[in-house]
Amino acid sequence: MAHCCNNFCQKILNIQNGFHSSTWSLGNPPEEDSCISMMDTFEPFTKTDIRQLLNKSSNVFFAVDLMLTWLVKDCLDVLISPITNIVNESLYLGVFSRFVKAALVKPLIKNHTMDCNILNNYRPVSNLTFLSKVIEISI
């Protein structure tokens, strides 16, 4: 199992090393003047837009998620304003909280006919948190 983790960690390092040196790393946001583009024509989502996205989303829950999807849906009347604000601010500023970036990464075999003993036959799949899925869907 450790070999499998090392294999995926090395893949992530290779991807990170492929980025231009000026690319900022997670947790270290760029200086304000280093932003390449801004969403200056950004039209904020309404509560109705976000409510529709949330109602369409699956109730699947992952261990890293701080928000139980079914519970958020049950309490949507109370939570719709803060969730809408978080989505709009994240998209407008291009900055995402650390808890939104959290993911549970699992290896998934690329094709069921491939040899499961060869690590390169797997790809990492990220299960995102509920809120990050909402932001992703809204884009």
Image: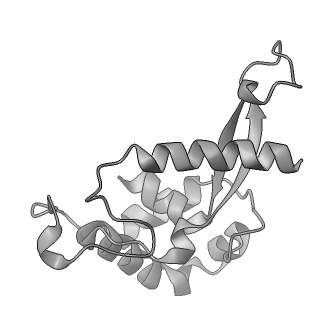
Residue at left offset 30%, top offset 66%: 91
Query: In the figure, residue 124 lies in which quadrant?
Result: top right
Give the farthest residue toward the top.
113
Residue 117 vertical position relative to residue 75 in the rendered view, above or below: above
Colour mode of the rendering: one colour
Residue 17: % across, % down: 43, 48
Q: Is 126 positioned to the left or the right of 85 in the image?
A: right
- Residue in view at x 74 percent, y 24 percent: 121
Is 56 in front, or is 25? 25
Indicate the position of residue 4 as horizontal and vertical percent values: 81, 43
| Residue 55 % position (x, y) | 57, 59
Q: Nearer the viewer, residue 29 or 45?
A: 29
Res. 82 image quadrant = bottom left
Q: In which image quadrant can residue 111 be found?
A: top right
Q: How many marks?
A: 0
Percent across and percent down for residue 130 are 60, 64
Judge from the rendering whether residue 1 lies leftward or rightward of residue 104; answer left or right: right
- Up the image or down, 25 lies above or below 137; here it is below
The vertical placement of 46 against 59, above or below, is: below
Q: Kindly identify the residue that appears in the image at 34 percent across and 72 percent down.
A: 95
* Residue at 19% across, 63% down: 43
Horizontal side of residue 34 vs 118, given as left or right: left
